[in-house]
Image (cartoon, rainbow, N blue to C red):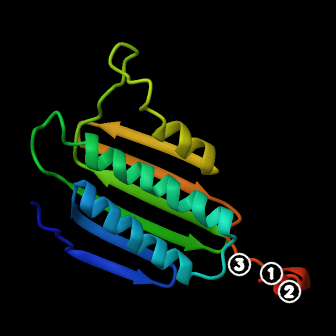
């Protein structure tokens, strides 16, 4: 069993940061839940948009936890930062692992949907991979509080 390691832990209004999180499934789920709690506290974000953001972040975290350090055969870490600037939310998920290219011969028919899903959910996705690791940048535009209409108030 691995032990979580949070050397930097920030969640203040417009910024969420977790650094040096042990890259495993348990910690990825924990960071996802902490991120969702922070995002929920940012305001009354539309439920569909909220779900899209959390799902995209989950996919990036899961990929890092499962694959980033597989070829190195060691336990590594994940760094996560989310910054809300006005109506734009930018999320960075980084590791110091090794990118694993998927080939048609090794790709499972039931796997390999995480990156296309992130691309479908976010307004912009950039994946930067080098010998130093992989960084996933997710940008979501129009992340703002929903104005509740009179009809919504009666239903809710």
Q: Quadrant of residue 108?
A: top left
Label 3 crowd (10 A; few <14 / some 14-19 / many >=20): few
- Compared with 154, 6 (above or below) is above
Relative image position of residue 81 (x, y in whole percent):
40, 66
Question: Where is residue 33 shown, x and y percent of the image?
Answer: 40, 70
At 43% across and 32% down in the image, what residue appears?
112
User: Could you say which disc has been placed on residue 32 in the image?
Assistant: none
Q: Are marks 3 and 1 in contact (CB under 8 Å)?
A: yes
Q: What is the CA distance from the residue labelled 2 to the residue labelled 1?
A: 14 Å
CA separation in Å, label 3 and label 1: 6 Å
Specify whether 6 is left or right of 56: left
The picture places residue 15, in percent across and down from the top left corner, at 46, 76
Q: Tell me the number on the disc at residue 154.
A: 2
Residue, x 23% and y 37% (percent of image)?
98
Q: In terms of secondary structure, where does tag 2 sit?
A: helix
Instruction: Please name which of the two marks, 3 or 2, marks the residue nearer to the observer.
Output: 2
Q: Residue furthest right?
A: 150
Q: Quadrant of the N terminus?
A: bottom left
Which residue is labeled 3 in the image? Answer: 145
């Amino acid at each position: 069993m691995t032990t979580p390691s949070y050397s930097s832990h920030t969640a203040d209004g417009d910024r969420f940061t977790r650094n040096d999180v042990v890259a495993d499934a348990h910690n990825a789920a924990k960071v996802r839940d902490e991120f969702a709690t922070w995002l929920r506290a940012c305001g009354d974000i539309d439920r569909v948009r909220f779900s899209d953001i959390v799902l995209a972040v989950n996919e990036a975290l899961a990929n890092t936890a499962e694959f980033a350090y597989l070829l190195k055969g060691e336990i590594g870490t994940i760094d996560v930062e989310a910054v809300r600037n006005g109506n734009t939310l930018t999320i960075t998920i980084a590791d110091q692992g090794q990118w694993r290219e998927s080939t048609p011969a090794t790709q499972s028919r039931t796997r390999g949907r995480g990156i296309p899903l992130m691309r479908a959910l976010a307004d912009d996705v950039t994946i930067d991979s080098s010998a130093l690791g992989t960084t996933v940048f997710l940008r979501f535009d129009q992340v703002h509080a929903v104005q509740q209409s009179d009809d919504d108030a009666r239903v809710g």
